[in-house]
Every structure is written in structure tokens, then in C-alpha cells.
Image (cartoon, rainbow, N blue to C red):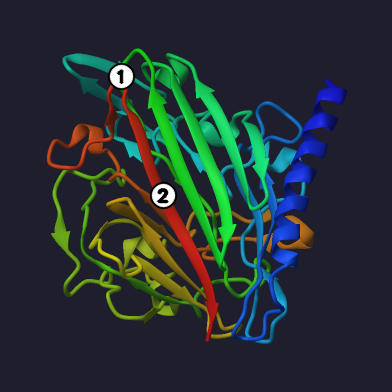
Amino acid sequence: MAKKFARIIIAIAGALIGLARAADTAPEADGRTWSLMIEGLLATCANANFDGAAIRALRVPNREGRLTDICLGYDDVESYRELDACLGGTIGRCANRIGGAQFTIDGTTYHVTANEGENCLHGGVEGFHKKLWDFTCAENAVTFTYTSPDGEEGFPGIVRVEVTYRLADSTLTIEYRAAAAEKDTVVNLTNHAYFNLGGHDSGEVGGHVLTVRADRYTPTDSGNVPTGTLASVEGTLLDLRTPTALESRLHDAAFNGGWGYDHNYVLSGGEQPAAELWCPATGIGLAMTTSMEGMQLYTAGWLTERAGKDGAVYGPAQGVCLETQHFPNAVNCPAFPSPILRAGETLRQWTAFRFFTR
């Protein structure tokens, strides 16, 4: 087993060297040209139950050209395996919540793992972020593959999944592909990166400025499960259609009980970025575009204190997650776009993060 782990670590190192080489050939960052480097695209480098296909670190230049690691992560395998929060992980088979941990497809009801009260969250106890993924490497990309067996966490059918991280032109693109074999099933994929554009170890993200191009959101019940309706953001603290500092929203007891954002937005679509996040302290910004109709905005209100990488200590409100996906609980809400993947069909989706300074 130790030899197998060593081979995986060496292969991962090779992938990272390839990505670093691609970044190293880019011009020096000087406010006009850019380079960025993914330090850790971790696909289970030491154990079959380790966090799969995850972003461990992402380094981009600040306005002075100094590389800054802007993603929360851990130093050790055990933390990814044992701690919650899914830092940087690929989420599936069904991201977000399924109300009552059950759904019905063509008259057949399926009961999946309830791991958040009565509901299923992020695929169950052993979601995709805790699976062993295979991988292949290209000059500027790594593709991770995983085959989810029939009945895993209660989900029907075999699903073959590919996730490709591609680095080009100051943009990290995540491409997803999933194919259902012999049964209809539910598939909803996302990435759970926690961005802190001040640096992963810089504390709370209250100084960040966020814009979300969404006129509506999905109201929820007491378990944060969408009820199947849509509502306008107009006149609410969910209205982020103009650049908004997060400072006053993260701990306001009158807003979501002081837990900050954990809400699904109905994205407006089109060619403009669906969301833009910017940190005035470092000048680092990101513009996110996606093929998906929804985005769960999470400002880490429930991130309990824990040891992070490089000696950092993480806690509530220290990251921003932009989780692009089908709407939560969509399988139980007929008015929502369906996350059902029919046997023989292939799902394709993508999300891209373009980095900049100003």
C-alpha cells in the first residue's frame, strides 16, 4: 500500500510541475501581464478516503506582483479526511441539499444518506470529495476521473465523472463531465473552494467587495432547503447587483441569524460575469462565469475554528464560496431545472475564474 501511495504522490507532483512550468513561461506579473500557479490539485495523494480532486492552493499576484495564496486548505491528509467544510473539494453526486434525503424518479422513490439532520448534503457522508480519483496530466491541465457505483450513498445507477482543471490566460477553468450508465439518476456537481483574496491566512473577508448578477434567489425552509419558489432580491440584503462590501453582512443578527450568506442565487446568464469578487487590500479580484443556472453563495459562517495550512488558523467568515450548480433540492421541485441525468446521457458543464488586479 505504501508503494501505491508513493506512486500517486509522484504522479501528482508531476502534474503540479507541469502546471508550474506553464505558469513559469508566462511574463512577469506587472499589472499588465499575469502568471498564476496552482500548487495543489490534490486527488487523493495518500488514502482512498481523502479529499478528492480538490484545489489545495491557488497563487495569484497582488497589485505589487507578489504571489498570494487565495484558497483555504490544509497541510496534511488527515485534516482533509476527517474535518468537515469540504475545503476546495469536488462535490457530488449531488451538491447542496436534498430535502428529506429522498427523491422520486418515474415513480420510484430513492432514499439517500441523511447527513445534515433529515436532509442529504453534498452527496452524503462519503461524497465525491472523499473519494479516490484517477487522473491524467497535460501541459496546462489535470483531468480527474471517478466511477460512482450503483447505490453509493443511496443514489441509483453507475455514473462516470470527469473533472478537468485547466489553466490559461490568467483563468482557471473547471470542466465537468458525467455519464449515466444503465439507470436514471441525479447528478449535481460543483467545486467548494473557499476564496480569501487577501490571502488564505488574512482573516475575515469583510473587506471584500462582491457583485452577483442575479435578480432572484430560492427561498428556503428552516433547514435551508429550497421550497420550490423564486423570490426577488429587490429591497433585501441578498441584492448584490451592485458592488457591495461584505463587512456589515457577515455577523448581522438580523440577517440569517448572524451566519452571513448561505443562499442560492438564480443567475441572470449572458456573457457578463455571474459574480465578481475583489479585495481592496491586495487589489486581487476574480470574475466568475459559468454554464450553470444557480450559485450558492456561502461566506463560511459555519466554518469552525481549525488549523489550516502554513500555520494559519481558520474560522467563521474567512472565505467566500461561489458554488455554481443546479438549484438545491431541484429534484424535488418540479418548477426548477432538473438535475436528473437519464441513462445514456452525458452532462457537461463548466465554471471559469479569471483573475485580475486593480
Q: Quadrant of residue 116?
A: top left
Question: Dot 1: what SS?
Answer: loop
Report the residue at 53% width, 79% height from top: 279
Q: Amino acid at mark 1?
A: Ala
Label 1 CA crowd tier, 10 Å (few <14, some 14–19, many 20+): some
Residue 47, percent across and down?
73, 29
The residue singled out by tag 1 in the image is 343
Tell me the quarter of the image containing the N terminus.
top right
Residue 84, percent across and down?
57, 42
Question: Dot 2: what SS?
Answer: strand
The residue singled out by tag 2 in the image is 350
Report the residue at 59% width, 40% height from top: 143
Name the foreground residue: 255 vs 324.
324
In the rendered view, would you say 123 is above or below 321?
above
Label count reads 2
Report the residue at 25% width, 64% height from top: 270
Is residue 85 visible in the rendered structure shown here? no
> Of marks 2 and 1, which one's residue comes earlier in the chain?
1
Q: Quadrant of residue 277?
A: bottom left
Query: Going by the image, does 205 lie left or right of 121?
Result: right
Q: Quadrant of residue 282?
A: bottom right
Report the residue at 41% width, 49% height from top: 350
